[in-house]
């Protein structure tokens, strides 16, 4: 799946929320910024884009890249904890959960996925949760299905609507 395909999937779910509820999701929350490619794509679409990166150098580069974009907020930290500050935003949130070690300079501090999902679930808000790289995280699928009722796999992405 190319990065553009991933962007199209995000758009598809954003549009689906609009079709089914009449609300256009305002917030895009990403875990794992890396070089900011997804931030760059989504800042044209969502009112507010938030992205959390654990690696200090990658964070600094993205922070510099987006500092003049008023609707983009790049945070430094472990998304396993930092996501807590965003799960209670008062509107539909589309999550792109993509924080994991992927070689090279990327952060290798353990997979934050189940902690992120627990915070999102406990916030009990309307959300679309898209988890990239299903093939890497398929071992978590049973646990995810116990937490959420509407779980699908589409193009190697786990797609959840709450
Ligand atoms: C696959 S890349 C993200 C790609 C990006 N989302 C995109 O679509 O362009 C994964 C990123 O997650 C970061 N990362 C790893 N563990 C993390 C954690 N616990 N919290 C936040 N970021 C983390 C890595 O440093 C790396 O930059």
Image: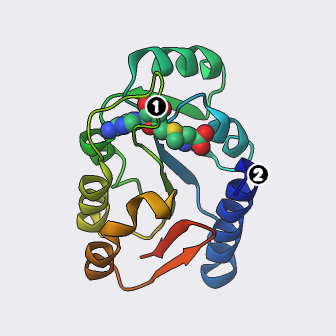
Tell me, yes or no, if residue 91 can be seen here: no
Residue 69: x %, y % from top left: 66, 26
User: The residue tagged with tag 2: helix, strand or loop?
Assistant: helix
Instruction: State the image coordinates of residue 44 (x, y, percent, origin top left).
Output: 74, 43
Badge number at residue 158: none
CB atoms of marks 2 and 1 within 8 Å: no
* Residue 143 vertical position relative to residue 99 in the rendered view, above or below: below
Q: Relative to 42, is 126 above or below?
A: below
Residue 103 circle label: 1
On screen, residue 132 versus residue 4, left or right, reads left
Ligand 1 near label 2 (Cβ, under 8 Å)?
no
Determine the residue positioned at 63% across, 47% down.
47
Task: Using the rendered image of the protein, determine whether residue 104 is visible from the camera's viewpoint.
Answer: yes
Residue 121 relative to residue 53: left or right: left
Tell me the mark number nearer the camera, choosing from 2 and 1: 1
Q: Which mark is residue 4?
A: 2
Q: How many marks?
A: 2
Q: Residue at x 74, y 60 (%)?
A: 8
- Element at label 1: loop
16 and 37: which is toward the camera: 37
Q: State the residue at coordinates (28%, 67%).
A: 121
9 relative to 46, above or below: below
Quarter of the image with the C terminus is bottom left
* Label 2 environment density (alpha carbons within 10 Å; few <14, some 14–19, many ≥20): few
Q: Decide if residue 73 is on the left or right side of residue 56.
A: right
* Residue drawn at x 23%, y 65% as measured from the top left: 122
Assign the N terminus to one quadrant of the image: bottom right
Quarter of the image for residue 100 reads top left
- Expressed as whole percent of the image width and height from the top left, the position of residue 49 reads 57, 41
Among the 4 quarters of the image, the one containing residue 87: bottom left
* Marks 2 and 1, the one that precedes in the sequence: 2
């Amino acid at each position: 799946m190319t990065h553009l395909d991933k962007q199209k999937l995000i758009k598809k779910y954003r549009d689906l929320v609009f079709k089914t509820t009449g609300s256009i999701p305002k917030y895009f929350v990403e875990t794992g910024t890396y070089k900011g490619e997804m931030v760059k794509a989504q800042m044209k679409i969502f009112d507010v884009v938030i992205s959390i990166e654990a690696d200090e150098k990658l964070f600094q580069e993205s922070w510099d890249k987006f500092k003049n974009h008023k609707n983009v907020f790049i945070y430094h930290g472990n998304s396993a904890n930092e996501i807590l500050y965003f799960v209670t935003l008062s509107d539909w949130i589309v999550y792109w959960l993509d924080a994991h070690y992927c070689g090279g300079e990327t952060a290798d501090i353990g997979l934050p996925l189940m902690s992120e999902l627990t915070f999102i679930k406990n916030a009990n808000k309307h959300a679309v949760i898209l988890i990239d790289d299903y093939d890497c995280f398929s071992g978590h699928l049973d646990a995810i299905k116990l937490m959420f009722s509407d779980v699908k796999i589409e193009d190697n992405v786990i797609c959840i609507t709450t």
